[in-house]
Amino acid sequence: MNLTTFSIGRPITTTMVFAALLLIGIISLVSIPIDLLPDVNFPVITVETRVPGYSSEEIENGITKPVEAMVSVMNHVHKVRSTSSEGLSQVRIAFNLGTDMDWAAADVRDKINLIRDTFPKDARNPHIRKYNPSEAPVAVLSIHGDLPSFRQRQIVEEKIEKRLERIEGVGNVSVRGGRKREIIVEVDRGRLQALGLSISRIAEILKSNNLNMQVGSVKRRTGRIITRVVGEYRDLPEIRRLAVGRTARGGLVHLGEIARVMDTFGKEENLIRFQGEPRIMVSIQKESGANILHISKTLRSEGSL
C-alpha cells in the first residue's frame, strides 16, 4: 500500500495528520525567536581604556597611539581603527577570517600589558572584549529640531527615552549628542573650613539625599562640585535648603548659605552630525532572546513619540 492509496482510503486520519503538522508549524513560527544578528564568532576585538578628566588629545597621545602601534604588528590583523574622545580610548582590531579569537584576545592582552606602565597614572585597566553582534543596536534614531541642543536632549531624556525603555524586548536605550544638564555647587572654602566641613563631605550629603542627581567630579582646588540631573526636582531652592551642618549654637546651616548653586549645562561630550546638522542620537539595544521583528513593529507604532 503506497501513501496515495492510504490517504484516499483513510481521509479522516490523513486530515488529522496534516492538521497536526500545520498546528506544529504555526506554534513554531510564533515561539521560535527571530534574530537579525545570531551568535557568530566575529573576528573583532575592542580595547577600551578610560581616563576620567583627560581631553581627547591627551587620550590619543597617551593611550590610543601606543595601543595601535602595539597591536598593528600582531599576526592575522586585518585592520585597526580607533576613536579618542574625552576620557575614553577605543581601539577596534579586526582579524582575518578563521583566526582563533581566544588566542587573539590573549595575545592582545599580553601586548597591552607590555605598555600598561606608560599609560597616564589615572588610567583604568583596559577592558578587552570580543565583538558580540547582540550588543549592536537594533535601531538608531536621529533627532533634530529648532530648539537649542541642551533643550532637545532634555526632552529626549525625559520623554522619548522613558517611552522606549518600556517597550517589551528593549534592553537598553542610550542617548548621545547635545549638552547634559548640570547643577554646579560652588562652595565658599572659608565658610566651609569655619564649619569644620570638607568638599568631600558636601558631596556625600548631596549623594545621600534623594534629589534625582548624580554627583560627578569634585574639584577641591576651586571648591566646585558638578552634579548631573537624572530626574526632576522641584526647584533650585530645594537644593539650597539642604542642611549640611550646624553652627556653634546648634542652628542649621543650609547649602545655600555656604555655596552658590547654579543650574547650567555641561559642554557637549559627543558631536553628532547628520548632513552637517547637529543631532541627538538614540540607540536601542534588545534583550537577549528578544524578537527583533516585534521590537521593530512596536517602534514604528511609536513613531509619533
Image (cartoon, grey):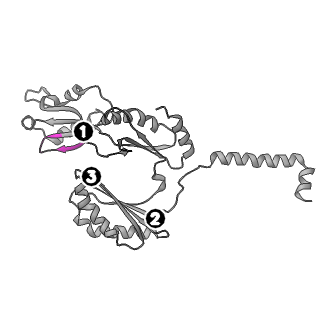
**Residue numbers of the magenta segment:** 216-224
Residue corresponding to mark 3: 87
Residue 224 visible somewhere in the drawing: yes
Closest to the observer, 189 or 157:
157
Residue at (53%, 42%) from the top-left corner? 296
Residue at (23%, 56%) from the top-left corner? 57
Closest to the observer, 93 or 5:
93
Residue corresponding to mark 1: 227
In reply to whether residue 260 is colored magenta, the answer given is no
Q: Is residue 99 left or right of residue 54?
A: right
What is the CA distance from the residue labelled 2 to the residue labelled 1?
A: 40 Å
What is the CA distance from the residue labelled 3 to the residue labelled 2?
A: 27 Å
Q: In the picture, residue 68 is in which quadrant?
A: bottom left
Q: Counting residues from the N terminus, which is met first, the one under dot 2 or under dot 1?
A: 2
Dot 2: element: loop
Closest to the observer, 295 or 17:
295
Closest to the observer, 139 or 235:
139
Residue at (19%, 28%) from the top-left corner? 240
The spot of residue 256 in percent (x, y) is 16, 29
